Image (cartoon, grey):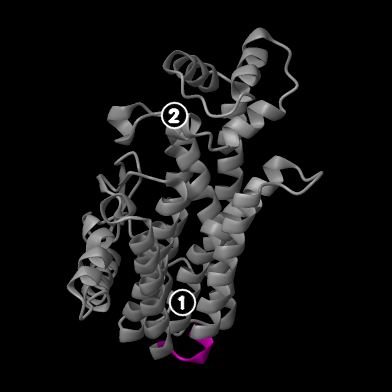
Amino acid sequence: MSTGTVQSSASVGLTLADPELESSVSAILRDVEAVLIDSVHSANPLVTEAARHLVDAGGKRIRPMLVGLAAQFGDPTGREVVIAGAVVELTHLATLYHDDVMDEAPVRRGAPSANSRWGNALAILVGDYLFSRAADLAAELGVDAVKIQASTFSRLVHGQIDETAGPLDGEDAIQHYLRVLQHKTGSLISTSARFGAMFGGCTPEQVEALATFAETFGIAFQLSDDLIDIASDELQSGKTPGTDLREGVPTLPVLYALASSDDDAAAVRLREILSAGPVTDDALHAEALGLLRESAALKQARETVRGYADAARSSLSALPEVPARLALDALCDFIADRTN
C-alpha cells in the first residue's frame, strides 16, 4: 500500500488531504514497518520466515494509521508513537494466523495462508510468537500500556469465543453478532487510537474521545466489509463475491434477511435458501446473492453502517478542528459511502 492512504478491500483509497498530515502519518507508518520487520526476526530461520509471511504481504495498516492520526492531536514525533503502532499491528497479525487456522482459510492477502503452507500447528505457534513480540514492545511503553494491551487481548479472545459458541439461548442473533464485532474488531482499533493519543501526549479527555470514536468506527469498518462481500463485483473488490455466504458466515445482511417477516416471494425464497446453512451449490449461491443484492435486508444493513459511522463522527466533537480531525471525519464518510 502507499503510505498515507487507507485502502478498502475493494481497492479504493482515501488519501489524507493535508500534505503535512500525510507526511507525518506516512513517516510513522514507514517507521512502524521497520519495527515490524525487526520484531518478527528470530534466531530460527523458519520462525522468521513464517512470522514475516503476513508482514510482507502488506495490508491496510488501519490500526497503526489510527495510532498516527490520534497522535496528531498532541506530538506525533515521539518514538513511543511508532512502537505503539507496531504493538497494535503485531497483535492484529497474530489474530490473523489464528483466524486462518480456525476458518481453514487457504489464502490470506492474495498469498497462501500460513496454515496451508506450514500446517495448523506452526501457524498457531507463530501467532503466539507474534503476540509475545507485541507484549515485549508494549513493555517498552510502560505498565499502563501493558495493562491496556492485556485487556484488549482478553476482549479479542472473548469475541472469538462468542463467535465460535454462537448466541446464548434466547439471545438475539443480530445483537450477538454486533457484540462479537465490538470485541473482535472494535477493541483493537480503539486501543490503536488510545495508544496514539496517550503517547502523543493528549489530554485524558482527548484520549477517551479518540478511543470511543475508534471503537465505533471499527464496528462500522467491519460491517462495511460484510456488505462489500455481497454488493461488489469481483473487479471492484478483488475477491469472489459472496464468499461469506458460501462459507456460511452469518454476516449482518444475512441476519437481517433471516429475521425478516416480509412475506413477498423474494424475501421468503431468500430465507428458505439461507436457512439451509452454507450456500455451496453454484446455482443457489448465484440466486441467493442476487436476492440479497435487491433485498430490504441489504438496505437495512447499509443504514446500520451509516448509523455507526455517524455515531463515531459524533465522538469527535470534543476534539479541536485540526487536519487530523477532518481526516477522521472523512474516514466516517468513506466507510459509509464505500458500500453504496
Asked whether, in this view, residue 261 is left or right of residue 182, the answer is right
Residue tagged 2: 242
Q: Nearer the viewer, residue 287 or 222?
A: 287
Q: Which mark is nearer the camera, 1 or 2?
A: 2
**Toward which corner of the image does residue 154 lie, by quadrant?**
bottom right
Picture coordinates of residue 102, whole percent (x, y): 47, 51
Measure the alpha-carbon separation of dots 1 and 2.
35 Å
**Toward which corner of the image does residue 23 lie, by quadrant?**
bottom left
Residue at 22% across / 71% down in the picture?
Answer: 48
* Residue that lies at the very extreme toward the top in this rendered image: 265
What is the secondary structure assignment of the residue under circle 2? Answer: loop
Q: What label sits on residue 195 in the rendered view?
A: 1
**Is 155 rendered above or below residue 248?**
below
What is the secondary structure assignment of the residue under circle 1? Answer: helix
**Is 64 rendered above or below residue 78?**
above
Among numbered discs 1 and 2, the one appearing first in the sequence: 1
Q: Please indicate, yes or no, whether residue 199 appears anywhere in the rendered image.
A: yes
Question: Badge 1 local density, few (<14 within 10 Å), some, or many (20+)?
Answer: many
- Is residue 315 shown in magenta? no
Q: Main secondary structure of the magenta part?
A: helix
Picture coordinates of residue 290, whole percent (x, y): 48, 17
